[in-house]
Image: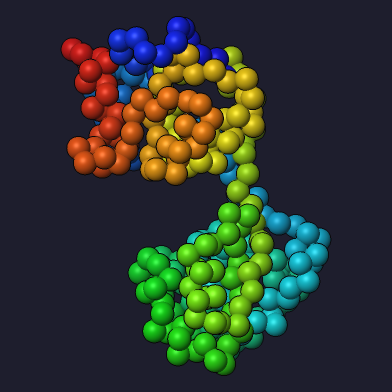
Amino acid sequence: MASNGKANGEAIKPVRTILVSQPKPERSPYYELEKKYGITIDWRPFIHVEGVSTKEFRRQRTRPDEFTAIIFTSKNAVDHFFRLCEEMRVKMSEDTKYFCISEAIANYLQKFIVYRKRKVFPGKKTIEDLRPYMMKHRENERFLLPCSNLGAKEVSTFLNDNKFNWQEALMYQTVSSDLSDLKDITYDVLVFFSPLGIKSLYDNFPDFKQNDTRIAVFGNSTGKAVEDYGLTINIMAPVPDAPSMTMALEKYLAVSNPGS
């Protein structure tokens, strides 16, 4: 991916193009920024999810139907759990209990199970929300945690600390997307939301130099990844006066593109 000019440290230069490292949403406050400042915002996921193949999963020597309780932390976990069950011709017992980190995930389960025949326990946001339900069933259930290559540290810690009988199963992976078609394209601002987005940038463009490209990051872990690669953070969110990325960008654009 090309960068466009001299080293950082000069006066803020105008912004004409921004690349957001996420899928394009149907509605977004970013579109208002485009109109207000006369800029172009493109969207491109730098990472994507791939399912673990049945062959790879079998190497883990794990059979989902040997577990009586499943913990779901995302819709991806739900998708790939039932995909692998289908591919392996595994039929889960109607008595299986499902513990879901959020109500949205619990509702999503309806694509795969009939609620009246199953036992589903929804949380609000974190594993701690499920504590009363899970502690009640700790002694009698064997728990399976479908996860990605990123793991689920908060959930794993909870299960270990409370001495659950449990096991994790790698069912999907978050990997770098192919961005080779962006090789000769220049953007004034690159927007990142996760450390994996930064990794993908360098997986695709090992010789990337920041030069005049401004880097916008969301979250401390993303910021650390940017700095670990020796890049300069120009736009940061969340901060007290800019809790969202669009607010942080607008704050920057008000200075870089005055009179727009």
- Picture coordinates of residue 227 (x, y %)? 47, 32
Q: Is residue 5 above or below residue 15?
A: above
**Left or right, residue 22 beside residue 124:** right
Q: Quadrant of residue 244?
A: top left
Q: Residue at x 40, y 35 (%)?
A: 217
Percent from the top left, x then y, of residue 241?
20, 37
Q: Quadrant of residue 213?
A: top left
In what quadrant of the picture does the C terminus appear? top left
| Apparent side of residue 237 relative to residue 191 in the rendered image (left or right) | left
Q: Position of residue 139 (x, y in %)?
A: 54, 92
Q: How many marks?
A: 0
Q: Quadrant of the N terminus?
A: top right
Task: Please tell me whether residue 147 is drawn above or below residue 19 in the rendered image.
Answer: below
* Colour scheme of the picture: rainbow
Q: Nearer the viewer, residue 111 or 39?
A: 39
Residue 4: where, in percent of width, then height? 48, 10
Q: Relative to residue 33, is residue 98 depicted above or below?
A: below
Outermost residue on the top side: it is 6
| 222, 30: nearer the viewer | 222
Residue 116 in sight from this viewpoint: no
Q: Is residue 190 visible?
A: yes
Q: Residue at x 66, y 61 (%)?
A: 171
**Which residue is at 49% across, 80% downward?**
162
Which of the pair 88/8 is nearer the observer? 8
Q: Of 26 and 101, which appears nearest the observer? A: 101
Residue located at (45% from left, 86% from top): 135
Residue lying at the far bottom of the rendered structure: 140
